[in-house]
Structures are given as structure tokens and as C-alpha cells.
Amino acid sequence: MKNKKISYINAIIVIIIVLSFGFIMNVFFKHYALNDFAIKEESKFFIFGDSHAATNFFQSDNGIQNFGYGSEPPNLTLLKLKYLFTEERYEKLKAVIVISPHNISKCHEMRFFNNDSTAAILSKHWVIIDNQYVFDHYNNLPIKTKAVIHLKKFFGAPSMENSFLIKTAFKGGFKYLEGNSELNDKALIEANNRHFGNANFNYKNNVSYRLKEYYYNIFNFLKIKNIETIVVSTPLHDTYWNLLTNEQILNYQTFINEIETDYSEIKVLNYSRKKMSDKYFFNGDHLNKEGAIIFTDLFIKDIKI
């Protein structure tokens, strides 16, 4: 009986130690991930989105602060906005939301939410900042993400590797793409298959209403905060457009039209058909550094007109 009592006590001690360790590590990683994730006082334009944001908006002393991160899903963008825009200086802020045709593809949704790809690992860390939002959208999460959430609920911290990844994802930043354009068919087809599906991963290119809903959540949040919002569609090379089906193009144009109709306060700048020399492209849908500098100057000029 005495040994049984000791076993219970030891079990309780182990549980307390594990929970305490989880709590301490969670506090540490939250601080590590977010300690330099902040709005700079001198910034005027805040860029959000995936690699099309990260590679196309050059950040220097031009008032641009780029939070873009490759393969960023819109739920992470919303998380960033909810965390950053808490100070009472909204009237000075301009949030730029970058979109491209693949951002609302059904294949893209399946990649993030159903298949739980490497890129979608970001969605697991909503709980670092906003627990309630995760549980409000619990049914939309992948099974593995749900498992991580429940583990965090009991043990606290995410893994160290994921914490380093999420730090990079939160901060984002301009991504330097050097070199001449790589507009070869193989690279373009691979990118198209990744964004819209191929013979082994084909969802008939239907539009994703789940991803569109996240973008509407972003626009509604910014509207409530009274933050000036600009939606930008960045330049895409003709070779990229030539790979898209009529349905994909129509879905994207419809989405842009819906934004302009439903959110009259949002300024929409569609540069997706902007003609730029091949030497300014890194590939079909990303500019290189030289192209990004030229495009960013054009964007700033258009906003100030």
C-alpha cells in the first residue's frame, strides 16, 4: 500500500514537472518568436502575403516594411495583423495585402489544410498568440494540427525547430532573388502544378471558398480598425498566364471584382498584366531584386498620386 502511494506521488511529481517545463518553454519560445516582431516607427506601408509579397516589394529607406513570407497562408497573415495593429496609430498605417491567382485555388487549400504540407506548419502556431481563434476555426484544421493543439493544451510549448521556423515566418522580409529570369517550361510547369494541381493532385481548379473567407476576415479586421487597405496583384509574366486555364483566370478576376464591390474603401492595384522586361523576372511569377526595386518605386508613385 505504501509503495502504491509512493508511485502515485511520483506520478504526480512527474506530471507537475512536465507541465511546468512545458509552461516555461512556451513562455520562452513565445518571447523568442515575437521579441523583434513589431512595427517600425518610420514605416508607412506594411506588406503582407506569401512569396509574391516577399520578393516583389523592396525594403530600404522608402517607408516599406515587408512582412511577406514564402507560402504564407492567409490565416497566418490575419494572425500577424491581429498582433501588430494594437497601438493607437492606425490613421498613419497602410496595410498592403498581396494576392495572386493561386492564392484562392482549391489545390492551394488542400495543400495547406488537408494535406498539412510543410508550408502549413505555420498554421499550428496560432496558439502562440491567439488561442481562441484556433478553437473558433477548429473544424477547418488538419488532423495533425488538431493533435498539436491538444498537446500544447496539456504540455505547453511547440517543438524547438518549429519555434525557429515561426520566428522567421512572423518577421518575414524582402527576399533577394538575384540573377536573370528562369522562364523555362519545366520550372513554370512545376510551379503551376504546385499551385493548381496536376494529374495526381487535381481538384478541377475550383475556387477555394475557405481561402476567400480568410481574405474577407482580413479585410473586415482592417476595416474595423480603420486601417487604410491596399490590395495589390503583382506582375506575372505572360508565360505564367499561358499556363492558366480560362476557369482559373475567371476565378481570380471574379475575386478581384468582389473585393472592389464589397469593400469600396479598399484601393485595388492590379499589376498582374504589367509588362516588364524578362530581365526583371526571376521566374514566371516572381521578380528579381532589380525588378522589385523598379516595381516598388512604381507602387509608391501610384499610391502618392
Image: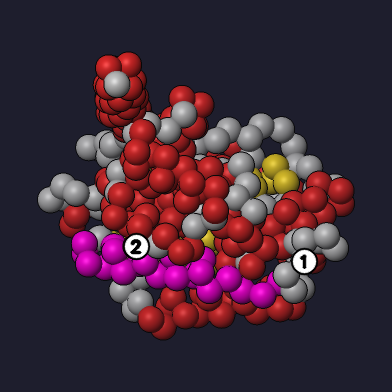
Q: What colour scheme governs how the chains and residues are painted in the rendered image of this protein?
A: secondary structure
Residue lying farthest to the bottom in this orientation: 261
Q: Is residue 189 visible?
A: yes
Check disc 1 and report the residue beneath it: 202
- Label 2: how many residues lie within 10 Å, few (<14), some (14-19) or many (20+)? few
Image location of residue 157, percent across then percent down: 37, 31
Q: Quadrant of the C terminus?
A: bottom left
Which amino acid is tagged 1? Asn
Q: Quadrant of the N terminus?
A: top left
Say whether disc 1 or disc 2 marks the residue closer to the N-terminus: 2
- Label 1: how many residues lie within 10 Å, few (<14), some (14-19) or many (20+)? few
Q: Is residue 223 magenta?
A: yes
Q: Element type at marker 2?
A: helix
In the image: residue 305, left or right of residue 202 = left
Measured along the vertical axis of the image, is residue 265 above or below residue 88? below
Looking at the image, which residue is at 22% across and 37% down? 41
Q: Nearer the viewer, residue 206 or 63?
A: 206
Image location of residue 12, percent across then percent down: 28, 25
Image disc number at residue 92 = none
Looking at the image, which residue is at 27% across and 45% down? 84
Image location of residue 120, percent across then percent down: 55, 47
Q: Nearer the viewer, residue 277 or 105?
A: 105
Check disc 2 and report the residue beneath it: 136
In the image: residue 14, left or right of residue 66 = left
Looking at the image, which residue is at 46% across and 64% down? 139
Q: Which residues are magenta?
A: 205-226
Disc count in the image? 2
What secondary structure predominates along the stretch shown in magenta?
helix
Which amino acid is tagged 2? Asp
Q: Is residue 53 magenta?
A: no
Q: Quadrant of residue 266?
A: bottom left
